[in-house]
Amino acid sequence: MKQNDLRADLSLVLVKPDAIQRGLAGEIISRLERKGLKIVAMKMLQMDKNLAQRHYAVHEDKAFFGGLVDFITSSPIIAIVFQGKEAVEVIRQIMGETDPAKAKPGTIRGDLALDLGCNLIHGSDSAENARKEIDLFFSQDEVLEYRRDIDKWLG
Ligand code: IDP
Ligand code: MG
């Protein structure tokens, strides 16, 4: 799939190490899938320090940066590209606020997490960052373009 254009319908999700360790990967992916979002790329990997530092580069001056890099590289993750109408915004809504203690019930973080560091999921925060983040984890060939028969029922 060509990712050169800015597309608000693509977003990168990371199912973080705490989610894999707690056996919540299926639950998290399922919530996004049931919304109607389409999985167009997915892989399990263990992030190395270099990839973590590039993925979280916007936070490199923050006090929590070192801890964040240690955490995200501590155990395998699942990286997923979701496609769907307003995917970036919709996924942020389903994730809930960054701090799970403040995230609303009904959201992934609000229902399933407590701690700011162990907040289960990453989702891109803008179309521009989504494109950059997708390029960090996937080659263009790995992002698949396909139709689902059900798409006509999702509008
Ligand atoms: P987001 O994941 O909701 O987009 P960001 O502000 O981009 O939140 O922060 C990236 C990640 O860094 C968060 O998901 C969280 O795990 C961690 N984080 C953010 N702020 C803090 C903090 O103040 N202390 C410790 N960890 C933080
Ligand atoms: Mg963020």
Image (cartoon, rainbow, N blue to C red):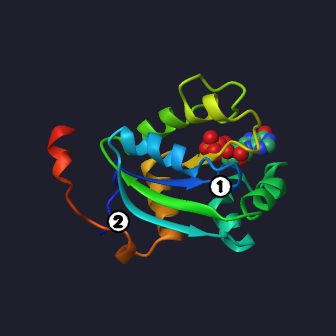
Q: Quadrant of the N terminus?
A: bottom left
Inspect the image, locate mark 1, and give the three-letter code of the amino acid beneath it: Ile
Q: In this view, does 64 lie to the left or right of 109?
A: right
Q: Is residue 127 above or below residue 85?
A: below
In percent of width and height, residue 8 lies at 36, 48
Give residue 44's position: percent from left, percent from top: 56, 67
Q: Name the residue under label 2.
A: 3
Q: Which mark is residue 83?
A: none
Task: Choose top left, top right, bottom left or bottom right for residue 118.
Answer: top right
The structure residue drawn at horizontal position 53% and vertical position 25%, both measured from the top left corner, is 106
**Tag on residue 20?**
1
Position of 140 with respect to 16 (left or right) is left
Left/right of residue 30 with respect to residue 150 in the rendered view: right
> Residue sitting at 26 percent across and 65 percent down?
145
Q: Nearer the viewer, mark 1 or mark 2?
A: 1
Nearer to us in this view, 35 or 145: 35
* Residue occupying image coordinates x 76% and y 44%: 117
User: Mark 2: few, some, or many residues within 10 Å (few <14, many ≥20)?
Assistant: some
In the figure, is residue 11 to the left or right of 71?
left
